[in-house]
């Protein structure tokens, strides 16, 4: 991982956060399974959870990556950002790829009926915000100034 001087101070791949939460939740669920009386039947939970995962990928993640690449930038946060992307999912959230990660946690939790992952998902969101989003926002504000501040006023961080 090579960090550029003209880039956000993100020091690790953000997808590691939800991946770690998933692994921890699987271990915790093996040790201490939680059901809270709610168990969706297998076909239904696959359809609901799969729909959440697919929707997150298609609506937020994939579209954001395509727009980034078409505008000459990378989705890798420690690389330079040549412009602020405001089209597509960036019109409703400043962080569609991170929102996708959180929604995938929700969808996988439904598929697996893993309440530990449900409880860890807000922690995932907080960690993404603390260690990826805030450094990115500081970088974009330094680089683009008022243009980025105006974008922040128009579009929410999450939804």
Image (tube, grey):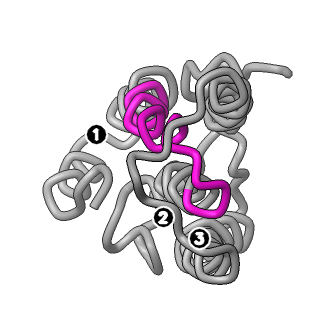
Quarter of the image for the N terminus: give it.
top right
Residue 59 screen position, x and y as percent: 54, 79
Q: Which residues are magenta?
A: 110-128
Above or below, 61 relative to 136: below
Residue 140 screen position, x and y as percent: 41, 38
Confirm whether residue 153 shows in the render: yes
Dot 2 falls on a residue whose secondary structure is: loop
Sequence-first tag of 3 and 1: 3
Q: Extreme left residue here?
A: 153
Question: On the image, numbered disc 1 is attached to which residue?
Answer: 145
Dot 1 falls on a residue whose secondary structure is: loop
Q: Which mark is residue 60?
A: none
Confirm whether residue 67 shows in the render: no
Residue at the location (58% across, 54% down)?
A: 113
Sequence-first tag of 2 and 1: 2
Question: On the image, numbered disc 3 is attached to which residue?
Answer: 49
Residue at the location (42% across, 28% down)?
A: 123
Q: Nearer the viewer, mark 3 or mark 1?
A: 3
Badge 2 density bin: few <14, some 14–19, many ≥20, Cα 10 Å: some
Residue 80 screen position, x and y as percent: 65, 38
Residue 148 screen position, x and y as percent: 30, 49
Q: Which mark is residue 85?
A: 2
Instruction: Verify whether residue 123 appears in magenta.
Output: yes
- 3D distance between C-alphas at marks 2 and 1: 15 Å
Q: Nearer the viewer, mark 2 or mark 1?
A: 2
- 3D distance between C-alphas at marks 3 and 1: 40 Å
- Quarter location, residue 79: top right
Pick whichever, 15 or 75, lies toward us. Answer: 15
Q: Nearer the viewer, mark 3 or mark 2?
A: 3
């Amino acid at each position: 991982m090579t960090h550029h001087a003209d880039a956000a101070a993100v020091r690790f791949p953000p997808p590691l956060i939800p991946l770690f939460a998933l692994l921890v939740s699987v271990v915790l669920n093996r040790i201490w399974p939680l059901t809270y009386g709610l168990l969706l039947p297998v076909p239904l939970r696959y359809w609901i959870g799969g729909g959440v995962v697919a929707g997150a990928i298609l609506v937020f993640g994939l579209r954001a990556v395509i727009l980034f690449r078409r505008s000459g930038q990378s989705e890798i946060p420690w690389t330079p950002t040549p412009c602020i992307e405001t089209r597509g999912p960036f019109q409703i959230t400043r962080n569609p790829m991170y929102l996708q990660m959180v929604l995938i946690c929700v969808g996988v939790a439904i598929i697996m009926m893993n309440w530990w992952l449900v409880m860890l998902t807000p922690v995932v969101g907080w960690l993404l915000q603390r260690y990826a989003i805030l450094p990115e926002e500081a970088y974009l504000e330094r680089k683009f100034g008022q243009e980025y501040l105006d974008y922040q006023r128009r579009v929410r961080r999450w939804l």
